[in-house]
Amino acid sequence: MERRPFIAGNWKMHLTLAEAVQLAQAVAPTCAACPDRDIMIAPSFTSLAAVCAAVKGSGLQVGAQNIAWDREGAYTGEISSPMLKDLGVSLAIIGHSERRHIFGEDNAMINRRLHGALDGDIRPILCIGETLADREAGKTFAVLDTQVREGLQAVNSAQMECVVLAYEPVWAIGTGKTASKEQAQEVHAFLRQLLAAMYEKTVAETVRILYGGSVKPDNIDDLMAQPDIDGALVGGAALKAESFDRIARFR
Ligand SMILES: O=C(CO)COP(=O)(O)O
């Protein structure tokens, strides 16, 4: 089953407005050079409007780094799907490990956010991943099983067409320690089996599963050569046009 590759940059809490627009403009031409893959950047909320305007028509997709579960209401500090759609945002990262571990978001909240995205026509990128302590305790698969089942609670097969998964082992994020291609492939294959058990086989075969955690120009080709790795969610290396461009042009 051919799955369209997906390279996504998560800019986290980096770049002021002018810097974000400049980087977006530098990255946009990569899309024309790589028409066989999806490429996305996720700037901070404050840069979304300007970045969307700057890359319009280039094919570069723009994502948010989180999303609210309701369309509107008394939720100080939150941003909803209609607000994002308004700007031209088409995707949202949900359940990033920094949201889980620094801001206390749990699987139940992440599931609500995911439904908020789906209901508002925003494609969710559901992030999952074990901590170093989980891995050392032999709990990697159990933790991922819970994150996937609870994160996708009440999501049906038709909705799964819009969902992207991102496996980001917490111990590999921002540490320079990438999961080896074998470690990543083992988990991605496990996730696909889990999806096959939860949904029908076609869902498991079509959902894209990205790898994230210290993805760099020098490891992307090996990662992308794995059969169940369909793309990458890139942090630090997405903040320089040159390295993100090279990652997007993986071979
Ligand atoms: O968290 C990440 C992407 O969402 C990965 O970050 P790094 O690529 O900096 O390790």
Image (spheres, grey):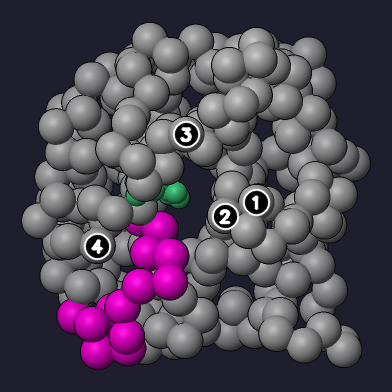
Q: Position of residue 119 (x, y in %)?
A: 79, 62
Considering only order in the chain, which callout, 1 or 4, is on the residue closer to the N terminus?
1
Q: CA distance from mark 2 to mark 1?
A: 5 Å
**Marks 3 & 1, CB-CB < 8 Å contact:** no
Residue type at tag 2: Glu
Identify the residue under disc 4.
239
**Marks 2 & 1, CB-CB < 8 Å contact:** yes
State the extent of the magenta-drawn residues as a range.
9-22
SS class, disc 4: loop
Which label is found at residue 98?
2
Question: Could you tell me how many numbered marks the image carries?
Answer: 4
Q: Does the beta carbon at disc 2 come under 8 Å from ligand 1? A: yes
Identify the residue under disc 3.
171
Residue at position x 63%, y 45% in the image: 126
Single out the mark in the foreground, 4 or 2. Answer: 2
Q: Is residue 97 left or right of residue 12?
A: right
* Mark 2 neighbour density, 10 Å: few (under 14) some (14–19) many (20 or more): few
Figure quadrant of residue 26: bottom left
Q: Is residue 171 left or right of residue 55?
A: right
* Mark 3 neighbour density, 10 Å: few (under 14) some (14–19) many (20 or more): many
Based on the picture, tell me whether residue 230 belongs to the magenta stretch: no
SS class, disc 3: helix
Which residue sits furthest left? 242
Residue type at tag 1: His
Q: Is residue 77 above or below residue 149?
A: below
Q: Position of residue 117 (x, y in %)?
A: 71, 62
